[in-house]
Image (tube, grey):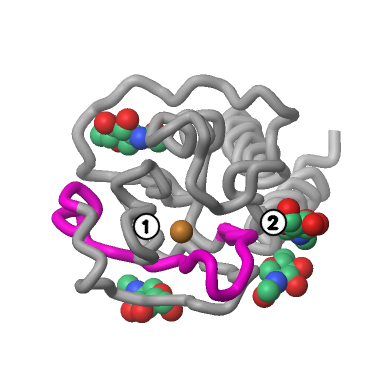
């Protein structure tokens, strides 16, 4: 068997999988068909929505709202918990609005319009690094998404699989 050629093929596959992973940012439509508004189901609405997805750095949150009626503000955990609408990190007032997730760990969003936050228009997403998160406390894996696995997940799996294959050839 031509071991050298297989090595090159494998390395090319690993590189291709890594490129695919970097290109595979997912755009998430916050709240699905509900969009970003005061949810009829209260504050559980957006936490339920978030718990159905796995978010990675580089993914985009698409907040669909009508300009003037709602806003998309990224806030601290303190402002999130207390619905402090005067204190935000970023504020988008024109809808619809995109926000690109750019840090691992929790990111918090509220609407700063009147009392919408306290009525449940608030969203926490837990953002995972694409290359694992060394140093974080052990936690159970998130539940599998109800939809098909994202391309990023497939790419991650490919890299793990290819790494195992490379290890076996050594
Ligand atoms: C995010 O992580 C925190 C802490 O582990 C957890 O309490 C919360 O339910 C998670 N939220 C989502 C939407 O997964
Ligand atoms: C945003 O919400 C409006 C009002 O519900 C809807 O008509 C529109 O199709 C949504 N935008 C997108 C891009 O789906
Ligand atoms: C939000 O991002 C999506 C996906 O990249 C893009 O198709 C859409 O045009 C963006 N919308 C806004 C309002 O920036
Ligand atoms: C993340 O993006 C927001 C909005 O663009 C920006 O204000 C913030 O500084 C960024 N954070 C990091 C860690 O890059
Ligand atoms: Cu609002």
Q: Is residue 16 left or right of residue 129?
A: right
Q: Nearer the viewer, mark 1 or mark 2?
A: 1
Classify residue 75 as left or right of residue 49: left
**What residue is shown with label 1?**
110
Question: What's drawn in magenta, residue-wise?
Answer: 59-82
Sooner in the amino-acid sequence: mark 1 or mark 2: 2
Where does ligand 3 appear, by image quarter?
bottom right
Q: Is mark 1 within 8 Å of ligand 5?
A: no
Quarter occupied by residue 88? bottom left
User: Whole-percent x and y of residue 13?
Assistant: 76, 50
Where residue 84 appears, as percent x and y from the top left, is 19, 61
Residue 64 vs 137, above or below: the answer is below
Residue located 42% across and 33% down the image: 42
Work out whether 12 lies above or below 96. above
Could you tell me residue 124's position as x and y percent? 37, 46
Secondary element type, mark 1: strand
Please tell me whether residue 60 is drawn above or below residue 132 in the rendered image: below
For mark 2, what is the residue?
Answer: 24
Label 1 packing within 10 angstroms: few (<14), some (14-19), many (20+): many
Magenta stretch: includes residue 32:
no
Which residue is nearer to you in this view: 168 or 62? 62
Q: Position of residue 103 (x, y in %)?
A: 36, 62
């Amino acid at each position: 068997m031509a071991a050298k050629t297989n090595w090159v093929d494998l390395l090319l596959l690993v590189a291709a999988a890594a490129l695919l992973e970097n290109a595979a940012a997912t755009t998430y439509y916050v709240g699905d068909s509900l969009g970003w508004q005061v949810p009829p189901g209260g504050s559980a609405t957006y936490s339920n929505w978030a718990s159905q997805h796995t978010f990675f750095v580089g993914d985009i949150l698409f907040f669909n709202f009508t300009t003037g009626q709602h806003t998309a503000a990224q806030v601290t955990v303190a402002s999130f918990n207390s619905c402090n609408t005067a204190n935000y990190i970023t504020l988008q007032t024109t809808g619809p609005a995109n926000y690109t997730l750019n840090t691992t760990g929790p990111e918090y969003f509220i609407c700063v319009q009147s009392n919408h936050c306290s009525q449940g228009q608030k969203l926490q997403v837990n953002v995972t690094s694409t290359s694992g998160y060394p140093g974080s406390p052990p936690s159970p894996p998130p539940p599998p998404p109800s939809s098909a696995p994202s391309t990023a997940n497939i790419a991650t799996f490919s890299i793990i699989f290819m790494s195992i294959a490379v290890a076996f050839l050594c």
